Amino acid sequence: MRELPELFESFSEARKQGFLTMKSLKEQGAGVAGTFCSYVPVELFFAAGVIPVGLCSTSEETIPEAEKTLPRNLCPLIKASYGFAVTDKCPYMYFSDLVVGETTCDGKIKMYELLGDMKDVHVMELPRSQQKESSKALWLSEIRLLKAKIEETFKAGISDEKLHEAIRQRNRERSLLKAVYELSTLKPPPMTGLQQLQILYGAQYKFNHADKVKELEETISRIKEEYEGGKRPVSARAKRIIVTGCPMGGATEKVVRLIEESAAVVVAYENCTGAKQYDRQVSEGGDPYKALADYYLDIGCSVMSPNPNRLELLGRLCAQFDADGVIEMLLQSCHTYAVETHRIREFLKARGLPFLSLETDYSAGDTGQLKTRIAAFIEML
Ligand code: BJ8
C-alpha cells in the first residue's frame, strides 16, 4: 500500500502524467473526445469505448495569443480554452477527434464557432430552464443527437446495455469522489482544501476506470487510517469554509492557498470541481437516455434561470460541513455567476452565514488584494 503523500502526489501530477497515457492510448487506436463543461454526459463516450477528457482551460499561459482574436474583457476560462487550441499547447486538444461544447454562456457559444475552424466541434443545445417540459424534451433530444454524433465519428455502436454499464461505472466514481470530500465533515478535517482539490481535479485525468476506483479507495482508507492514528494535518481552530462559484483548478488554486494561509480550511467545494459534479447519481434503471437527461439538466449552474439547485446544494453543504463562512470565486466577466451573487448573499444572510464574493482572473496580479480581503473576512468569523 502506498503512503499518503505519494497518493496525493499521484493526483496532483495526474494531468501531466495523463498526457503520456493519452499518447499511448491514441497510438493503440483509442478515440478521444474533449469537453469543457459538466453538462456533457460523459457516459455516452464510455459506452462507445471513447475516452472523454476535460480540455486545458485553467492557466494564463495562452491568453495573450487568444486576445489577438477574442476581446480582452472576456472570461479567462474561455480565453484560455481558445488560446490552448490555437497554440496547440494542450495535448488533450491535440489528441481529441471530437470536441463537444454546450450552449451554456454566450462567450463560450461564440468561442465554439471559432474553434470549429480548427476541430470537429459538436455543440449541444442546453436549455436555460430546468422546469419546462419543452426544455426537458429538447435536452433529451440533444442527448440522442450526441449519441448519433459519437457513433458516426467513432464508428462505434452504443447499446442500451453498454450505456447502463457506463452509468453504473460513472456513478461508482461519483460516489468515491463524494466519499473523499465528505471526509472533511470531520472536525478538524483530515486533509487541507488544497489536497482535496488536487484529488477532485486530478481524478478526471486518470483514464482507466478500474485503476481509478482502486486508487480512490486506497486514498480514502489511507486518510482514515492516519486520522484514526492521531494525525491532524489541519488545526482544530481553522475556520471552516465552503467555496462556491466558477470552476477551480490550475491558476485559481491561488484563492484556496490564500484562504488556507489565513487560519482557515476549505472543507467543501460547491462548484463544478466538487459537489456540483459528484453529489448526485444518475438513475440506474429505466431508459438510460431519460436518466442522463434528467440528471444533467438538473446541474445547478448559474446559466439556468431560475437556478434553485445551486441554493439547495449550497444550503445542504453548509449544514453538513458545519461551515463558518462561504467564499465565492467569480471569474472576471462571468455575468451569470456575478448576477447570481445577490441571491447567494441573501440566501446565506437568512441562515446567518457570513459570505465573501471575490472576482479574479488567472494572473497573479491581484494576489495582494485577494489576500487582504480574505484575511479580513476570516478574522471577523
Ligand atoms: S456547469 S459552471 S463547467 S458552464 S465559461 S459560465 S466561468 S463566463 S464554466 Fe461552467 Fe458548465 Fe456551468 Fe460548470 Fe462563467 Fe466563464 Fe462562462 Fe464558465
Image (spheres, grey):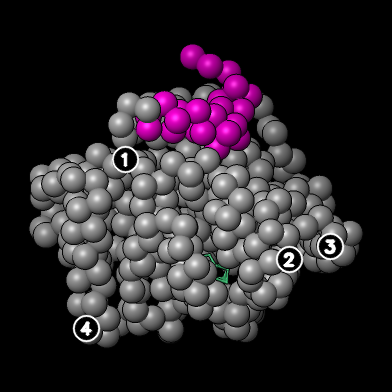
Q: Nearer the viewer, mark 4 or mark 1?
A: 1
**Label 4 lies in ligand 1 vicinity (Cβ under 8 Å):** no
Q: Label 4: which residue?
A: 133
Q: Residue at x 34, y 79 (%)?
A: 127
Q: Residue at x 70, y 34 (%)?
A: 233
Q: Is residue 213 magenta?
A: no
Q: Label 2: which residue?
A: 360
Q: Label 3: which residue?
A: 366
Q: Position of residue 6 (x, y in %)?
A: 60, 22
Q: Position of residue 195 (x, y in %)?
A: 63, 39
CA gap, disc 4 and disc 3: 44 Å
State which region is magenta.
1-26
CA gap, disc 4 and disc 1: 34 Å
Indicate the amino acid at tag 3: Asp
Mark 4 or 3, nearer chain start = 4
Image mark for residue 31: 1
